[in-house]
Image (spheres, rainbow, N blue to C red):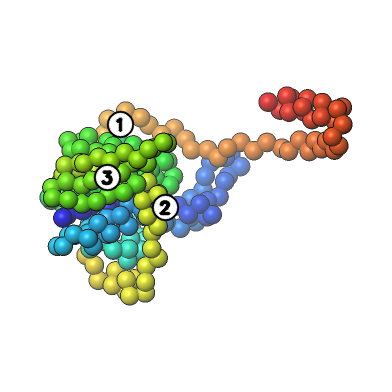
Amino acid sequence: MNIVACFKLVPEEQDIIVNGDRTLNLEKATPKISLYDLNAVEAATELAAAMPDSKVSALSVGGKILENSKARKDILSRGPDALYAVIDPALESALPRETAAALAAAVGKIGSYDLIICGEGSGDLYAQQVGLLLGSLLSVPVINEVSKITAGDGKVTVERTLETEVEVLEVPLPAVVCVTADINTPKIPSMKAILAAGKKPITVWSVTDIGASTGGAPVVMQSILAPAQADRKKVIVEGDSDDKVAAFVESLRKVL
């Protein structure tokens, strides 16, 4: 089985600086694999381990953040056999549709595949759209909110945990599956895996190389701002008498 695990590199939240105008400074933010995509990579490697002669390819598209060698080694140390990255200035701040279009073109460049696994969303935008759009662009079955995957002959059986029941579906291959964080607990790579990651193949393409189009985006990002900070009112009401309770309720009404 040929499995493609899609992932995104996002800035480390603790390194993000909020400027006075509420814009974000990411210059000193260390790149890391989006937490939701760690589940996708883990699911891909677990599935490959259960299927003889399987291969896992890690795939990502974006800007220069993908040039980070430490992040590349991190993703390869988690089980994928090879890494494919589409690095282009046009994808620096790509929104879901442009991202999905680039992923679809890259998958075509990689070659045949049986299953593509995505996380439920990215750690920055969390739009939850890329996997669904990718399946649509590839004209293959796509399903999201998957909490379990079992491989079969020419199909996968997936489970979706709903509010009051568990939905079990059979999905013919090739297909795209978007997994939730409940599907597994990503393992911490061993030292042996980290050392072996440096010997795995890495292929880098540009948008031109994969024949993708990044023009005509229906949505344009205007700005990303941190939430406005409000000063604390510092209203303290002590006691449980009727007048104190009334004062407390009145204070809440003014705030709401």
Residue that numbered label 2 is attached to:
35
Q: Quadrant of the N terminus?
A: bottom left
Q: Name the mark nearer the viewer: 1 or 2.
A: 2
Label 1 and label 2: CA atoms lie apart by: 27 Å
- Residue 196 visible somewhere in the drawing: yes
Identity, as a three-letter code, of the amino acid under mark 1: Ala
Q: Residue at x 31, y 49 (%)?
A: 148
Label 3 and label 1: CA atoms lie apart by: 33 Å
Residue that numbered label 1 is attached to:
217
Q: Residue at x 27, y 55 (%)?
A: 44
In percent of width and height, residue 159 lies at 30, 44
Identity, as a three-letter code, of the amino acid under mark 2: Leu
N-term-proximal mark, 2 vs 3? 2
- Residue 103 visible somewhere in the drawing: no
Q: Nearer the viewer, residue 138 or 62?
A: 138
Q: Residue at x 27, y 52 (%)?
A: 5
